[in-house]
């Protein structure tokens, strides 16, 4: 008997899952545990695995189409097996009356299925086509059963744009509008809400990490001899931030309508870039962890998030966030607060600069730091003192190890 494969529920708040792509097509053989489709919700993307061996008999939900959890997305069974789906017969009762005999008769009429030439098109493709003014009757579908997909609509848009380009002046912009959905939509809403509902201010400062770079190299060699994973510069920066939050309690807080909440534990959010957006896993009670324990936790969380393994990973409850764009060559930037936190530290790329130390000119490693904070909670002076404390730890890295 054919097995139903349904859209899984990826979280308590999930209302809809979207088919990102099908790894198999109708008629392909599948093995139990083999990924048959990729799906995503607002925050998570994962693979749907085949519950049993067999053949992919039918696909009920096309790519880019969203459906509620529990909806059947495909059937798996034996080759040429007939799928038994629930069918409902609608019955109408027709009342006939005779003005002469005044007799009423009730006839049950069962409606027969009528084959109609209904155009097949995915919801996303239809939305794009309508927004662009395309005549969907002229689009050739490439999906199963001639279904029009998002790719078909985009292809038609490009074709029409090319024709228009040939008949209009040079330099006219060619545009394709893509609906905002999934993780990108959540990020857009949260970031806009953050800016609208807080008084954000960013201050910047540079720290001389020449000694930190040397210390890290020494620690790296020691770790390699013992066969352990090396510490990254970001591990030291996160640890310095945690120590500084312990000395500046007002930065480890959040704004509430009834007042300011000061948190006892330091729960650091680590911004991790993934393919389609940004996630912030949380290192809880970071004040109780050593430098090595902090580094190990960050590495495990980051690896799990990038692989899409979200079970057991906390994505909420952070009291402060650290985001590092140094690997992209970025210097100073303006990070946006992760609500309802009071602060977020942005870290840029290290720059080698000549610098006088006493009467001697030396080559130094300078790192740019950008602190965004909520001015409703903290004023400029205490925020600057907090950033100075972080700078102090980075310029005297032995204090980070103690």
Image: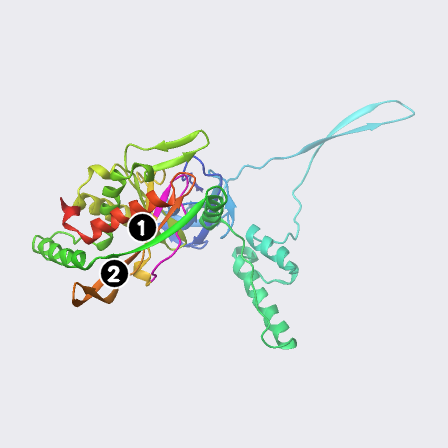
Q: Which of marks 2 and 1 is in front?
A: 2
The image shows a total of numbered marks equal to 2
Tell which circle, 2 or 1, labels the residue nearer the N-terminal end.
1
How packed mark 2 is, by other alpha carbons closer than 10 Å (few <14, some 14-19, many 20 or more), is many
Numbered range of the magenta stretch: 330-344
The quadrant where residue 24 appears: bottom left
Q: Which residue is drawn at 38% across and 55% down?
A: 275
Q: Residue 362 at x, y = what percent?
A: 18, 67
Camera sees residue 41:
no
From the viewer's side, name the closer residue of 389 and 98: 389
57 or 127, nearer to the observer = 127
The residue under label 1 is 307
- In percent of width and height, residue 181 lies at 50, 49
Which SS class for mark 2?
A: strand
- Which residue is painted at 42% across and 30% down in the image? 259
Tell me the tag on residue 366: 2
Depth order, front residue of 349/380: 380
């Amino acid at each position: 008997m054919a097995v139903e494969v349904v859209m899984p529920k990826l979280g308590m708040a999930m209302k809809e899952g979207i088919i990102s792509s099908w790894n198999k097509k109708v008629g392909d053989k599948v093995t139990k545990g083999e990924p048959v489709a990729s799906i995503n919700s607002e925050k998570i993307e994962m693979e749907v695995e085949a519950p049993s061996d067999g053949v992919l008999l039918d696909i009920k939900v096309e790519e880019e189409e969203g459906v509620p959890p529990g909806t059947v997305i495909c059937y798996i069974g034996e080759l040429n097996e007939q799928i038994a789906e629930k069918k409902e017969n609608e019955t109408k009762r027709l009342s006939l009356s005779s003005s002469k005999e005044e007799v009423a008769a009730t006839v049950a009429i069962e409606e027969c299925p009528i084959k109609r030439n209904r155009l097949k098109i995915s919801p996303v493709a239809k939305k794009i086509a309508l927004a662009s003014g395309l005549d969907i009757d002229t689009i050739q579908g490439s999906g199963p059963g001639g279904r029009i997909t998002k790719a078909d609509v985009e292809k038609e848009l490009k074709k029409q744009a090319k024709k228009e380009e040939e008949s209009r002046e040079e330099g006219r912009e060619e545009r394709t509008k893509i609906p905002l959905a999934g993780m990108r939509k959540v990020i857009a809403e949260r970031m806009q809400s953050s800016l609208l509902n807080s008084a954000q201010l960013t201050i910047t400062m540079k720290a001389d990490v020449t000694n930190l770079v040397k210390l890290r190299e020494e620690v790296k060699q020691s770790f390699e001899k013992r066969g352990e994973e090396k510490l990254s510069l970001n591990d030291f920066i996160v640890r310095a931030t945690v120590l500084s939050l312990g000395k500046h309690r007002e930065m480890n807080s959040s704004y509430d309508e009834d007042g300011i909440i000061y948190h006892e534990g330091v729960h650091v959010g680590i911004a991790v870039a993934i393919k389609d957006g940004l996630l912030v896993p949380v290192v809880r009670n970071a004040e109780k962890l050593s430098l090595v324990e902090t580094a190990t936790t960050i590495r495990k969380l980051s690896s799990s998030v990038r692989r899409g393994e979200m079970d057991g990973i906390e994505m909420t409850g952070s009291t402060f966030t650290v985001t590092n764009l140094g690997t992209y060559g970025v210097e100073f930037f303006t990070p946006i607060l992760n609500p309802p936190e009071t602060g977020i530290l942005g870290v840029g790329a290290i720059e080698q600069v000549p610098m006088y130390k006493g009467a001697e000119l030396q080559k130094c490693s300078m790192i740019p730091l950008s602190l965004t904070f909520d001015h409703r909670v903290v004023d400029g002076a205490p925020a600057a003192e907090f950033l100075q404390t972080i700078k102090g730890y980075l310029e005297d890295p032995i204090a980070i190890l103690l």
